[in-house]
Image: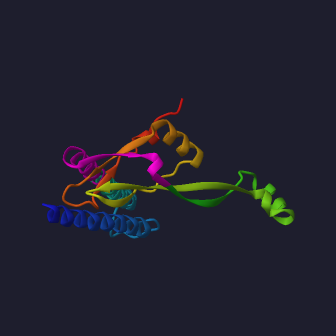
Amino acid sequence: MMKINKIFNVFINLISIFLILLGLLSILVFRKYKGDFFSYPILWIVLGGISVFVGVFLLIYLANQKLTSYKNFNNDKVDYLKNNGDKYFIEFDKCDIVFRKEYVNERKKKSSRAYIYDSMYDNSQNNISRVNYQIMLKCSLSIDNKRKVFETRIFNISLDNLKLKMALKKGTYIYINKNKQSDFYFDLNFLNDDVN
C-alpha cells in the first residue's frame, strides 16, 4: 500500500510539473502570436493560465497531504507509546537544560531613503539583534538498575519561561517502547500551558 502511494505521488508530481511547463509555454508562444493557423490565441493563453493554476494547485495539495500524513503518523506513534509503552515520571531536578543561543540580525522597517542615509553614516542603525534559544532537556532515568539518558526534541522558548514552567510543573512523564528503548516520547505539553 505504501509503495502504491509513493508511485501515485511521483506520478501526480510529474503531471503537475508537466501542466505548469505546458501552461507557461502556451502563454509565452501565444502572447505575441499573429498567425492564422490557431484561431483565438487568447483562448490558448487562458488555457495555459488554467494549466499553470491546476499544476500549482496539485503541488500544494501533495505538500499538504504529506504534512497531514506525517502528523497522523506522529500522532499514531504517540498514542501507541502512551497506551502500550512503559510510563515513567521524571523530576525536572534530574534534568539538565542544554541550550544554544542564536543571534539573528533583522532589518528595521524604514523607508529606502532612510536606509541609504543610514548606510552612509551608521549602518548599525538598520539592524536589530534578536536572540533565539534552541533548548533541549537531557534527563537521566534508572531502568532495570541501569542509568539511561533521554533527550527531548529541540524547542524554541525563552530560558526564563522554561525555568518558570518547569518550577511550576515539577516533572513530566516519558513513555518508552518496551521492545526498543530508543523509541520514546517526552510529554512536553506543559510548555503550551499559560503561566498565570
Residue ID at (20%, 55%): 178
Which residue is most to the left? Answer: 1
- Residue 161 is one of the magenta-drawn residues: no
154 or 24: nearer the viewer: 154
Picture coordinates of residue 14, whole percent (x, y):
27, 68
Can the viewer see residue 2 in this picture? yes
Q: Is residue 93 magenta?
A: yes
137 relative position to 8: left or right: right
Relative image position of residue 165 (x, y in whole percent): 51, 40
Residue at 49% over, 36% down: 168
- Residue depicted at x 28% and y 58%: 145
The answer to whether residue 58 is seen in the rendering is no
Residue 191 vs 49, above or below: the answer is above
Residue 94 spot, x, y in % from top left? 44, 51
Q: Quadrant of residue 187?
A: top left
Stretch in magenta: 70-96
Note whether 88 is above or below 115 in the view shown: above
Where is residue 58 drawn, in percent x and y?
A: 31, 57
Nearest the eye: 61 or 100:
100
Please tell me whether the stretch drawn in magenta is mainly helix, strand or loop.
Answer: helix
Rendered residue at 23%/49% (across/down): 86
